[in-house]
Image (tube, helix red, strand yellow):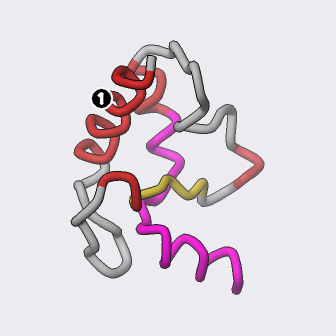
């Protein structure tokens, strides 16, 4: 299951451009996160443990998100 989650995350990160949309960081996959622009539209998290949702459905959820590095993600939530 861990292998699948990493593979799915890599595919979703690639789908969203492969780097932080704010600062361009792209060194470590684990440091890239999905930020839901409108929490009210969030149906599910994209990195939930044990998720067995199809990649197509996860892409629909990813379309509601901005790809951010961990630092930029923290700054967004601190604002």
Magenta segment? 61-79
In percent of width and height, residue 29 lies at 31, 53
Q: Residue at x 53, y 37 (%)?
A: 46
Q: Is residue 18 above or below residue 62?
A: below
Q: Nearer the viewer, residue 47 or 60?
A: 47
Residue 27 picture quarter: bottom left
Q: Residue at x 28, y 60 (%)?
A: 28
In percent of width and height, residue 30 lies at 39, 53
In percent of width and height, residue 71 lies at 49, 77
Q: Residue at x 60, y 54 (%)?
A: 36
Q: Residue at x 45, y 44 (%)?
A: 63
Q: Is residue 45 left or right of residue 58?
A: right
Q: Is residue 65 magenta?
A: yes
In percent of width and height, residue 55 lies at 38, 21
- Disc 1, SS: helix
Q: Is residue 17 magenta?
A: no
> Hey, which residue is sitting farthest right in the picture?
40
Q: Which residue was labeled with disc 1? A: 7
């Amino acid at each position: 299951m861990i292998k699948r989650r990493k593979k799915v995350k890599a595919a979703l990160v690639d789908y969203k451009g492969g780097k932080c949309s704010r600062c361009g960081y792209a060194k470590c996959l684990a440091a890239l996160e999905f930020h839901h622009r409108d929490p009210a539209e969030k149906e599910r998290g994209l990195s939930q443990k044990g998720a067995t949702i199809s990649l197509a459905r996860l892409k629909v959820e990813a379309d509601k998100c901005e790809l951010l590095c961990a630092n930029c993600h923290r700054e967004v939530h601190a604002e």
